[in-house]
Image (cartoon, helix red, strand yellow):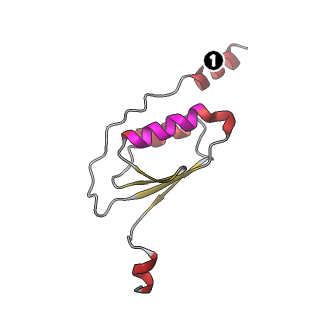
Amino acid sequence: KWKEKLDALRERILPNPQYEREKGDSRNAAAIIIFDVPEIERRKRAWLRSVLVNLGCTMVQKSVWLSRTPLPQAFVKDIHDMRMARYVHIFGVTKRGTLSDAFKL
């Protein structure tokens, strides 16, 4: 029973949303963060959004964000520790461009 209570307490305590920004070349380092956190875990979703704001990420849509610098490893670890990895997807971007660039519109 104590393990269940400890797990329940850990679920209620969220990590500090302040992470040290990683150094990186903003012209080359980019990531797209996409998430779909269920309503039942809205506290975690709010925590995730506050972390992304604090890291200087740009919101593309409500659950799609762009980071122009590398994401801190501590942040990625916390996502795993909070059992959110199945809801959060991070994609590295190696090329930049838009649809109009691709088709020379």
74 versus 69 height, above or below: above
> Residue, x 42% and y 85% (percent of image)?
105
Q: Nearer the viewer, residue 86 or 101?
A: 101
Binning the other alpha carbons within 10 Å of mark 1 as few (below 14), some (14 to 19) or many (20 upward) gives: few
> Residue, x 38% and y 32% (percent of image)?
18
Question: What secondary structure characterizes most of the magenta part?
Answer: helix
> Where, quadrant-wise, is the N terminus in this rendering?
top right
Which SS class for mark 1? helix
Quadrant hosting residue 25:
bottom left
The amino acid type of the residue labelled 1 equals Leu
> Residue, x 65% and y 21% (percent of image)?
8
Q: Nearer the viewer, residue 42 or 5?
A: 42
State the residue position of label 1.
6
Quadrant hosting residue 100:
bottom left
Which residues are the magenta region? 43-53
Residue at the outermost bottom position: 104
Q: Whole-percent x and y of residue 26? A: 28, 58
Residue at the outermost front position: 105
Residue at the outermost right position: 1
| Total numbered labels | 1
> Residue, x 39% and y 80% (percent of image)?
101
84 inside magenta stretch: no
Q: Whole-percent x and y of residue 39? A: 67, 38
Q: Nearer the viewer, residue 32 or 104?
A: 104
Q: Whole-percent x and y of residue 75? A: 44, 40
